[in-house]
Image: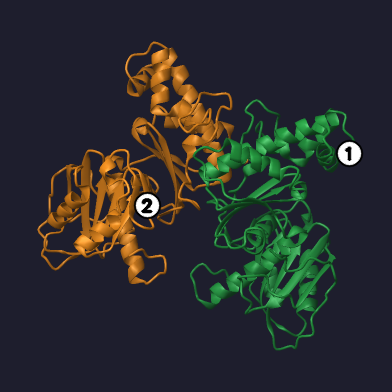
Chain colours: A green, B orange
Amino acid sequence: MTALASDTTRDSDAATGGDVSVVLGIDVGGSSVKHLLARSDSSTARPPTPLARGRNATPTSSPANGLAEIVERVRGDRTLTRLVLSIPGIVDEQNGVVVRSANIPALDGTPLGRQLADALGVPVDVINDGHAAAVAEASWGAGAGIDDVFVLALGTGIAGAHVIDGRVVSGAHGSAGELGHITIDPNGRDCSCGRRGCLETIIGAPALHAAWADAGGKGGPEELLEAFASGDGTATAIVRRAASALAEALLTLCALVDPGAIVIGGGLAQAPHHLVMLAERYVRERATFHRVPPIVPATLGGWAGANGTVLTALLRQHAAAHRTPRTVA
Amino acid sequence: MTALASDTTRDSDAATGGDVSVVLGIDVGGSSVKHLLARSDSSTARPPTPLARGRNATPTSSPANGLAEIVERVRGDRTLTRLVLSIPGIVDEQNGVVVRSANIPALDGTPLGRQLADALGVPVDVINDGHAAAVAEASWGAGAGIDDVFVLALGTGIAGAHVIDGRVVSGAHGSAGELGHITIDPNGRDCSCGRRGCLETIIGAPALHAAWADAGGKGGPEELLEAFASGDGTATAIVRRAASALAEALLTLCALVDPGAIVIGGGLAQAPHHLVMLAERYVRERATFHRVPPIVPATLGGWAGANGTVLTALLRQHAAAHRTPRTVA
């Protein structure tokens, strides 16, 4: 239940010698880049003690070069055996290519894995940031100890990832887990995806913002949740509708996927007693044949993605050592 | 695309000698038991040529003894290395126990795997019949050559199974794949599962029967589909509504699971140009971000289950030979 790192110190390297084999995980965000360095022989059973951790501004003009510089600086004279980066956007994980990143457009179409592998001389993997956060929450966060976890991030959009044995089950085309775009209200509002009445049109942050503003509320979703907590009637109606929609989506998830735990994170879930616990209550009230698993808030917060890159690096490191056929080098 | 067997001959054993190692697959139905015998070293890439195949009446009074007798007779003097049975009902596959079988109540609570293993001296697995049919359709039927297949059986109930690399992804509690019980119409009819407006309340055979009878139609779902094919307006409205509901369920499936193919079988799908192709058209018309895979009719018909037991036997046989830790002995 503990995060590998939760502070924001810059390069707080431990005093280790040069003869250490390490893996490096880097969570590339729109504004900052978080890194975590761990021994290559760390267990994946729990978060390893980081040899270094820190945060830098995201290099936006020439990101591949900027990232290579960060890697060189962080690894110092240690032997780097594997690097994993997470990127916000659509990633071709098999080929290490950033297909499209709305937050870091300079990376669009970049074969980042190949470029960094060539520059650094080590195996490099590039993964989606939501997948990184999900594997970390599933293995080291709220889902620790459970083999089969569905991780849901509630925010502007809604991202889901089904994690089995530490791997995201990403579907035949890499697009599984879109719980935000299953239909909840066939007669509902238009969704950004082009359909109507998706979960996101009811519980996405912009939808909550609009519903709250339409009802005369001040501020955004945070203020809405505060008003709900203080018993405001208008806020209660909006939050109940959102929690009800989330409950319906979770019942569909249980019927179709039957996960062993559901972990809910993201901005909207940081006050879990508000929205998530209400949704859980509705799920348990409405379930019939469904096997409803524990529904719990995420625990790793903003460092989930960085933890996930380190975990992925360790898993692939170990897999490579055991010569399994699915290793990506 | 070819079934391992599709006729109903009784014990049409080939003239093979006694020094052959074989696996036996038995599909136990409510009225008949189908068996297929194959060489233990058969490839799983395609349906092996059966050494024996046949059908017997289901032994209902003392089913474990009756099944053991069938096995003894079919194997003859060959060396049986593994037996897999499929059972209609709830099966604890890990322990080989028939939890509940509405069609063969004498098996309820029976540790059939253990009993037959003791009686026959070979490893025995017991699996759910829908799972058996699904792995066969995915690997040897309409899904052959695709690693990630969702198999749907439309009939009185609606059963789904997600098959990846020849294994059913059955969820944390063994109850994944319940596409028939996701909500399509929140204001719809009461469902047998205790909820409302599930897919099954619109496209299940009893629902179609009722809708057709309510509209003055004669006969059941088959007659409904015939009337639809001949352009009857009332039948068209009912079938369109059913296909539309199925399309919505398949869009949810694509969003959440993202399979590489969707195979649709079962009694209602035997005229695929009627219902399934209409549903597919709706899916393609309504899809936005979804990656819609091929949606194809099942090809193995009534022998899908028996094929699945042989395939499962071969897969576990090979896994045991490679000493993988997930082997069930």
Q: In the displayed image of the protein, which residue is found farthest to the right?
A: A218
Residue B107 in sight here: yes
Mark 1 closeness class: few <14, some 14–19, many ≥20 residues within 10 Å:
few
As displayed, is residue A160 above or below residue A119? above
Quarter holding the C terminus of chain B is: bottom left
Mark 2 closeness class: few <14, some 14–19, many ≥20 residues within 10 Å:
many
Q: Nearer the viewer, residue A238 or A180?
A: A238
The quarter of the picture where residue B160 lies is top left
Residue A122 at x, y = what percent? 66, 76
The quarter of the picture where residue B116 lies is bottom left
Residue B87 at x, y = what percent? 30, 46
Q: Chain of mark 1?
A: A
Q: How many marks?
A: 2
Point 84% across, 28% down: residue: A215
Tag shown at residue A219: 1
Residue B119 at x, y = what percent? 20, 60
Residue B52 in sight here: no
Residue designated by label 2: B139
Q: Amino acid at mark 1?
A: Gly
Tag shown at residue A111: none
Point 36% across, 58% down: residue: B95
Residue B32 at x, y = what percent? 21, 41
Tag 2 secondary structure: helix
Q: Give the side of residue B282 with respect to residue A278, left or right.
A: left
Q: Nearer the viewer, residue B7 or B230?
A: B7
> Mark 2 or 1, which is nearer the eye?
1
As displayed, is residue B223 above or below residue A23? above
Q: Give the side of residue A185 with respect to residue B76, left or right.
A: right
Q: Chain of mark 2?
A: B
Tag 1 secondary structure: loop
Real-space Cα separation, disc 2 to disc 1, in angstroms: 55 Å
Q: Give the side of residue A48 with respect to residue B65, left or right.
A: right
